[in-house]
Image (spheres, grey):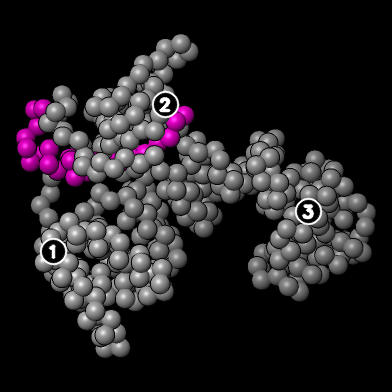
Amino acid sequence: MMNNQNSPPDLKEIELFTELPAKRLDFLALKLKKQAYGPGEQIIRIGRSGHFLGIIESGEITLEMGPGQSLTASSGQVFGSEMLLKGKPSEFTVTAQTDTIIWVLNRSDWQAPSPPRPKYRPMLHVKKAVWISLIVTSALAISLLTLGPSLLDWANNTLPDLMVEKGRADQAENYLQFSLRLQPKSPRLHGMLGDILVLQGKDQEAIEVYEQALILDEYLPWIHNNLGVVLMRVDELELAVDHFQSAIDLNPLNTTLYRNLGNAYYAQEKWSLAAASYQEALELDFTLSETKSTWAGLILNEHRLVEAKLVWEDVLRTDPRHAHALQGLGVVSLLEEDPGVAMLYFDAAQYLDPDDINMHLYIGMALEAMERPSEAADQYQYVIARGSDPDLISLANTLLEIVLE
């Protein structure tokens, strides 16, 4: 359950911060990030390097040091001071006991200087074809400004989404462009504009806007993440990795960031790094079926057959119609020299995902192992005729030559 209180805690009331000057306190207060947890949800595990301080706004948590050794903390209390000050791993496993709101201060923000805001003069690019839309949104923005900043903030948070829902992403873009003329130093508005540009397929423009947002405030993990996603779309994989890493440094408890980092490494064919990133995501949330299934495939490549099999079986317990997990268990059965069982898995996977060209290759291998060469040859020929991956076609050609000997 989310808390309606949006104001961060007053840091000068917390002993750790009492000796800091007012300007430094103001800077750190801007870096606080709110996190919500449900009953039983683990916040951090003992021994993990969280690199953050947690300030409890509401709710109750337990801090476990070992069997039978636990403490309870509630509103106004803090945890993780050794992680923040010295970068040490967590001394506790921290778990929410009730609906809990925590403000997080990352160690990178604690160590960062308080930089002055860079000067920036935005440029407004308007197409003549949308002048009517611009007039409407500009007039709306002006009227909101005259009614006060709180209403303007509400409008900025609400109206672009409403416009997108109505299929008017172009109108949302114009609105945000005008809002930026009124609030040119708002990194959040730049980030929102970047999101709207992405929806319209304007990836290069979005990249420029996200980069401008990070010039204004480099400590926004959601903008690092969104920029990383767009950079992956334009094949700037190294830069994408850098931004996902920055987002994780700022928000180490977000599973999506580890998954996106894993996807970037996967696209680079850096299998061990991808597997490590997916594992980090799963340590935070082991219910992620797609991530578990992909991770199992990666550890299978490391010859960890038993572990991969257990993970895919766990995926199927949650989702019996998960085609990739069925395919994975079929491959495991082939490696265990049980082609009959492999065929059962492959048939089920192909029924669920009939367009997966890989399945024809695997089915051919199973049929060959069952001494049904003509049927296996048909499967390999299908891959050669319909496949688009040169490596897959080359493998099918090789297997076809073997089966026809």
Disc assigned to residue 251: none
The residues colored magenta run 18-40
Secondary element type, mark 1? helix
Q: Amino acid at mark 3?
A: Ala
The answer to whether any part of residue 127 appears in the image is no
Residue drawn at x 35%, y 25% is: 60
Q: Is residue 318 above or below residue 156?
A: above
CA gap, disc 3 to disc 2?
41 Å
Foreground pick, 315 / 385: 315
Residue lying at the far top of the rendered structure: 68
Please rate how many residues cluster around mark 1, counting C-alpha atoms within 10 Å: few if below 14, some from 14 to 19, many from 20. few
Task: Answer with mark 1 or mark 3, whichever residue precedes in sequence.
Answer: 1
Q: Is residue 404 left or right of residue 218?
A: right
In three-dimensional space, the C-alpha distance between marks 2 and 1, rounded to whole angstroms, equals 42 Å
Instruction: Say which residue label 1 marks.
Output: 147
Q: Is residue 18 left or right of residue 298?
A: left
Q: Residue at x 27, y 32 (%)?
A: 57
Residue 133 place in picture, x, y as percent: 28, 81
- Name the residue tied to disc 3: 348
Q: Nearer the viewer, mark 2 or mark 1?
A: 1
Q: Specify the quadrant that holds the N terminus.
A: top left
The reply, left or right, for residue 126 in relation to residue 380 is left
**In whole angstroms, how far apart are the C-alphas of marks 1 and 3?**
61 Å
**Nearest the eye: 176 or 133:** 133
Instruction: Identify which amino acid the numbered label 2 is placed on.
Output: Gln
Residue at 30 percent of width and 24 percent of height: 74
First reached walking from the N terminus: tag 2 or tag 1: 2
Q: Which residue is mark 2?
A: 97
